[in-house]
Image: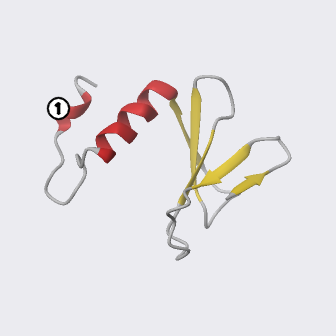
Amino acid sequence: MSTTFESGTVWRKSSHSGGNGACVEIATPAAGAVAVRDSKDPQGPQLHFSAEAWNAFATATGAGAFAAGGFDAGTFGEL
């Protein structure tokens, strides 16, 4: 699902979203940047990350680094 706002930014929600309102949406407002927001509050705050940081987060999430009891700060290297 995508939503476009006045700025032309297209926000996307995962097709795996359960429809329960507990979702985040992502957008790429500029080259090399990723923005994240709460789908329940589309006019609310946004978090902005470099594409590199977002890819590291997504890779770690897919590998289970944030599963219950599985967080390993070493996954991200030195912050």
Quarter the C terminus occupies: top left
Task: Return the residue found at the far right.
Answer: 6
Q: How is the image coloured?
A: secondary structure
Q: Residue at x 42, y 29 (%)?
A: 53
Residue shown at the point (57%, 35%) measured from the top left: 34
Q: Quadrant of the N terminus?
A: bottom right
- In the image, is residue 36 above or below residue 31? below
- How far from the left and from the top, in percent, is residue 77? 22, 25
Q: Which residue is mark 1?
A: 74
Q: Left or right: where does residue 13 sit relative to residue 49? A: right
Taking depth in this image into account, of 42 and 51 the one nearest to the observer is 51
Residue 54, given in percent of the width and then of the height, sits at 45, 34
Which residue is rendered at x = 82% and y = 41% of the image?
8
Q: Is residue 6 left or right of residue 45?
A: right
Image coords of residue 40 (percent x, y): 61, 67
Where is residue 62 drawn, in percent x and y? 32, 46
Q: Is residue 32 above or below residue 71?
A: above
Q: Quadrant of residue 73?
A: top left
Q: Residue furthest left?
A: 69
- Mark 1 belongs to which amino acid? Gly
Q: Is residue 30 above or below residue 21?
A: above
**Secondary element type, mark 1:** helix
